[in-house]
Amino acid sequence: MARSLKKGPWIDAHLLKKIDAMNLARDRKVVKTWSRRSTITPEMVGHTLAVYNGRKFIPVYITENMVGHKLGEFSPTRQFKGHSSKVEKVAKVAGAPGGPGAPGGPSGAAGGGAGGGAPAGKQG
């Protein structure tokens, strides 16, 4: 759920103090932070913040499009490995004994079965 607009954005005080000090000194160094909950403000634009994802620090360069979002949105905590492809599924099913297309299975000529090889509960 989003934060109330009348309260304003949440930024950790220690992070805001570091950003303000860097803006006054015109410094552009990487700042490590654990504050994933902080909202990105216009003062942060142009800085690089290293946001902790639970294992390592992910460098995030702040642009104008990121203002209003949280820092944690740009430092993923989980790695998506991907879904298996359809080709792998077909190869796995075709190679399985008793599966569709396998010789001598329940839907084959030698196997009898319940008519047409449809699994129980999936008929008609």
Image (spheres, rainbow, N blue to C red):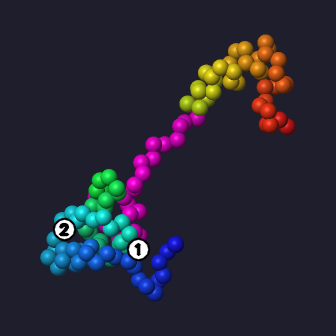
Viewer-proximal residue among 21 and 54: 54
In the image, what residue type sits under mark 1?
A: Gly
Whether 94 is drawn above or below 120: the answer is above
In this rendering, would 110 be left or right of 20?
A: right
The residues bearing labels 2 and 1 have C-alpha atoms spaced at a distance of: 21 Å
Residue 65 seen: no
Span highlighted in magenta in the image: 59-87
Q: What x and y, as percent, mark residue 33? A: 27, 65
Task: Determine the image quadrant of residue 49.
Answer: bottom left
Most distant residue in the top direction: 110
Q: Is residue 25 left or right of residue 72?
A: left
Mark 2 or mark 1, earlier in chain? 2
**Residue drawn at point x = 27 percent, y = 61 percent:** 50
Q: Residue at x 40, y 55 (%)?
A: 77
Element under disc 1 = loop
Q: Please report the residue visible at 82 percent of the width from the left and 17 percent of the height from the top.
A: 112
Give the residue displayed 41% in from the left and 83% down from the top.
8
Q: Is residue 61 magenta?
A: yes
Q: Is residue 6 above or below residue 34?
A: below
Tag 1 residue: 68
**Would you say 115 lies left or right of 74 here?**
right
Q: Which mark identifies residue 55?
A: none
x and y, in percent, of residue 40 in the image: 35, 72
Q: Is residue 120 visible?
A: yes
Residue extending furthest toward the bottom: 6
Quadrant into which the C terminus falls: top right
Residue 28: mark in rendering: 2
